[in-house]
Amino acid sequence: MTGSMYAAISGLKAHMGALNVIGNNVANVNTLAYKTTRYTFNEALYTTQINGTDGTEISGGRNPAQIGFGANVGTIDLDMSTKNYTPTGLQLDTMIDGDGFFFLGDKVTDQGLAGIGVNDKAALSGLSLSRLGNFSIDPEGYLVDGNGNVVWGFLEIDASAADIAAVNRMNGISEDGNSLTPPEKEDIEKGQAALAKMSNLRYTDKKIEVDGQERTISVLTSATSAYNMLTAIRLPQLDAQKNVYFPVPATSTNQRPSETDSVVAQVIDRSELQEVEEGGSTEDSAGAVTLERAMGDTYSIDPKSGALTMLVNDELVTVGNIAIAKVTNPNGVTHVDGRYYQALKGAGELRVTSLKKIDNVDSAGDTKFITGGLESSGTDLATEITNMITVQRGYQANTRIITVTDSMLEELVNMKR
């Protein structure tokens, strides 16, 4: 007889667990980018009273007779589908429309890495994932979320003028672009080496005169350095000579970049950038030159390419492109701290994607950004209130089983007075 009481107790625990899920959903009805969870019940352990049989030539078969011992919460599932857009009016607020997450973390990883290869799954798994894009620029020029976590993506680095000239020279075009000259072996080698580092090549048709006849040649005018690593997005810097640097993975952000850890960027005219006072740059004991941050007047995020841009004296400078993390099973990510997730077991493969076409980086597909607002909470209050009423009645029914079982046990005890 006490089996019914134990079954009812398991039912009470299961319904209380379900109520916890509902309560959390309702509590986050106004939490931006909150993803609701749902519960399912499972039947608990069964005991077999009579085994089933298949029958014989003489007698028929018989079904097994089993008694269950209640229920428990079987699954608690995330719903990672995209919800409604909530306008905020803030230029850097960004919503992901479709599958995917923002990569967020510290300026360097737990392994001390300032840059992560797009195929380095171990290092990528150490970054946090989030759907909430409440971004701003911090005093050091980093793109951060509301909790100060740095946004990771791809730096926009223009190929150097020397590399562009080397490619043109390999193609037989003179440095000034006004004549054709056969390339030497050394020119071909240098041009091929420079071309291997480039992507997004842009050519301009130009008419020149060769042997008294007009010819049209294609001159390489600009390109992007191939840089397939993820790094913290940060505004460019200026040194004392007003050279502009994008600090690609470096060991220290206040050291003057070297050939291996920074790339000189070809951006707007230096005179229009932030002025560095004469003698304002200092050298520490190691001889490192302090860089000044090039701050813009306004900032925005392009919803088509995911590019962070800044306006400096009416000139637009592209800082970098925000990366989008994708997993095989978005509903399988694991909560690690409030709004943040990690792609642990159950989420499947973690991939780096981009809205903008970048060599050797997967496309984000149908995913896009909506700027000037954030994703609303996924809680449907009408559904949660209905579920709460259902759970409440289920809980009451289980308490009734306990009281009825207790009454029957009381009658048994008092059978003989």
Image (cartoon, rainbow, N blue to C red):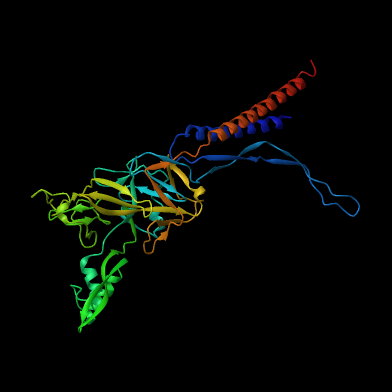
Image coordinates of residue 54 in percent, x first then y, are 82, 52
**Residue placed at 45% from the left, 34% from the top?**
30
Q: Quadrant of residue 399?
A: top right
**Can residue 234 be seen here?**
no
12 or 58, which is in the foreground?
12
Q: Quadrant of residue 187?
A: bottom left
Image position of 394 with respect to 162: above or below: above
**Can residue 123 be seen here?**
yes
Q: Residue furthest top?
A: 417
Name the side, left or right, on which 5 lies relative to 342.
Answer: right
**Residue placed at 22% from the left, 49% from the top?**
312
Name the side, left or right, on which 74 lies relative to 294.
Answer: right
Q: Quadrant of residue 355?
A: bottom left
Q: Residue furthest bottom?
A: 211
**Quadrant position of the C terminus in the picture:** top right
**Quadrant position of the N terminus in the picture:** top right
Image coordinates of residue 88 in percent, x first then y, are 37, 38
**Residue placed at 75% from the left, 23% from the top?**
408
Image position of 62 with respect to 397: above or below: below
Name the side, left or right, on which 115 lies relative to 166.
Answer: right
89 or 261, which is in the foreground?
89
Image position of 120 with respect to 331: above or below: below
Image coordinates of residue 29 in percent, x first then y, are 48, 34
